[in-house]
Image (spheres, rainbow, N blue to C red):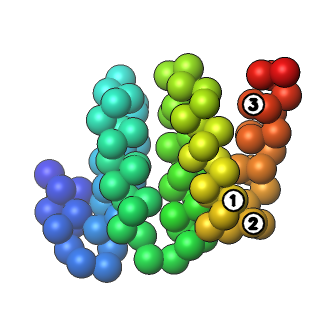
């Protein structure tokens, strides 16, 4: 509940949504976690934060076997922050596996 009230707070709402996503993921609600991370990434103001959130989102998508969507999300993460080495490594791994 505290996360939800924080999610209504302007500038740091994305942090609360990312935390809610983590709780949902741990409870097995992967679709809900995907939705919350997507929303959080959309409202985070710094491109580096958006990129990290997209990486987390891609990891959930991989767990859900949504590989093509994960690759797309990782590509966008790299557009936002080309120095996101973890996103680049995961994208390269997924591309290598799809060959």
Q: Is residue 32 above or below residue 7?
A: above
Q: Relative to residue 14, is residue 46 drawn left or right?
A: right
Distance from Cα at disc 1 to Cα at disc 3: 15 Å
Return the x and y of residue 5 as percentages of the image width and height: 14, 63
Residue where numbered disc 3 is placed: 94
Residues 72 and 23: in front is 72
Q: Which of the marked residues, 2 or 3, is nearer the chain's N terminus?
A: 2
Q: Which secondary structure lies at badge 1? A: helix
Graded by Cα atoms within 10 Å as few (under 14), some (14 to 19) or many (20 or more), the crowding at tag 1 reads: many
Return the x and y of residue 28 as percentages of the image width and height: 35, 23
Q: Which secondary structure lies at badge 2? A: loop
Residue 88 visible in the shown view: yes
Residue 78: image tag = 1
The residue at the point 69 percent across, 59 percent down is 78
Residue 59 visible in the shown view: no
Question: Disc 2 vs disc 1: Cβ atoms closer than 8 Å?
Answer: yes
The residue at the point 21 percent across, 66 percent down is 6
Distance from Cα at disc 2 to Cα at disc 1: 5 Å
Residue where numbered disc 2 is placed: 82
Return the x and y of residue 59 as percentages of the image width and height: 58, 36
Graded by Cα atoms within 10 Å as few (under 14), some (14 to 19) or many (20 or more), the crowding at tag 2 reads: some
């Amino acid at each position: 509940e505290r996360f939800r009230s924080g999610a209504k707070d302007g500038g740091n709402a994305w942090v609360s949504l990312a935390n809610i996503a983590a709780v949902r993921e741990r409870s097995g609600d992967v679709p809900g976690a995907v939705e919350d991370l997507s929303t959080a990434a959309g409202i985070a103001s710094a491109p580096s934060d958006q990129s990290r959130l997209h990486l987390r989102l891609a990891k959930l998508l991989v767990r859900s076997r949504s590989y093509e969507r994960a690759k797309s999300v990782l590509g966008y993460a790299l557009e936002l922050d080309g120095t996101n080495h973890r996103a680049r490594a995961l994208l390269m791994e997924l591309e290598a596996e799809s060959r």
